[in-house]
Amino acid sequence: MEKMMLPHDHGRSAGEVLGLCPPAADFQKLSQLLCQLDDGTRLKLFWILCHCEECVINLSAMMEMSSPAVSHHLRQLKTAGLIVSRREGKEVYYKAADTAQAKLFHRLIEELLEISCPKD
């Protein structure tokens, strides 16, 4: 790749760094994932689902929220790829996705809150 010429030379190779930069779409995907950090309810739901698989009705009771409100947060977490669901009869069960991103997000929450996973 050709070296980018910048208007000012500050003795650094910012142009070279820019050449190594991932595409803008990768940053957009990361931004959508990090948007999940902007809501404490969503963070708590995700943390719970890192430790158990649960249905909307039970999650609603745990969170002291309506089922539609919980479903809204679950939809956002699922769209971000942080949780997965499975249907069993009429019930839909949710749990954290088994992905590197979900595992990192889980560790991030616990590190920032200085908490540990519950013991099995």
Image (spheres, grey):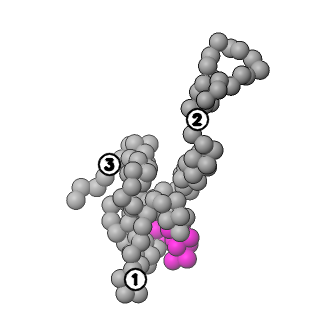
Expressed as whole percent of the image width and height from the top left, the position of residue 35 reads: 58, 53
Looking at the image, the residue that sits furthest to the top is 11
For marks 2 and 1, give the one nearer the viewer.
2
Q: State the separation of the CA atoms marked 3 and 1.
A: 29 Å
Q: Residue at x 53, y 64 (%)?
A: 79
Q: Nearer the viewer, residue 44 or 100?
A: 100
Q: Residue at x 52, y 73 (%)?
A: 71
- Would residue 69 appear left or right of 84 to someone viewing this image? right
Any magenta on residue 65? yes
Q: Nearer the viewer, residue 116 or 22?
A: 22
For label 2, the residue is 21
User: How many numbered markers are drawn?
Assistant: 3
Q: Nearer the viewer, residue 114 or 5?
A: 5
Q: In what element is the residue under mark 1?
A: strand
For label 1, the residue is 91
For label 3, the residue is 116
Q: Which residues are magenta?
A: 63-74
The quarter of the image holding the N terminus is top right
At label 1, the amino acid type is: Glu
Mark nearer the N terminus (2 vs 1): 2
Mark nearer the N terminus (3 vs 1): 1
At label 3, the amino acid type is: Ser
For marks 3 and 1, give the one nearer the viewer.
1
At label 2, the amino acid type is: Cys
Q: Quadrant of residue 49?
A: bottom left
- Would residue 13 appear left or right of 105 to someone viewing this image? right
Expressed as whole percent of the image width and height from the top left, the position of residue 2 reads: 64, 26
Q: State the separation of the CA atoms marked 2 and 3.
A: 34 Å
Q: State the separation of the CA atoms marked 2 and 1.
A: 44 Å
Expressed as whole percent of the image width and height from the top left, the position of residue 57 reads: 43, 78
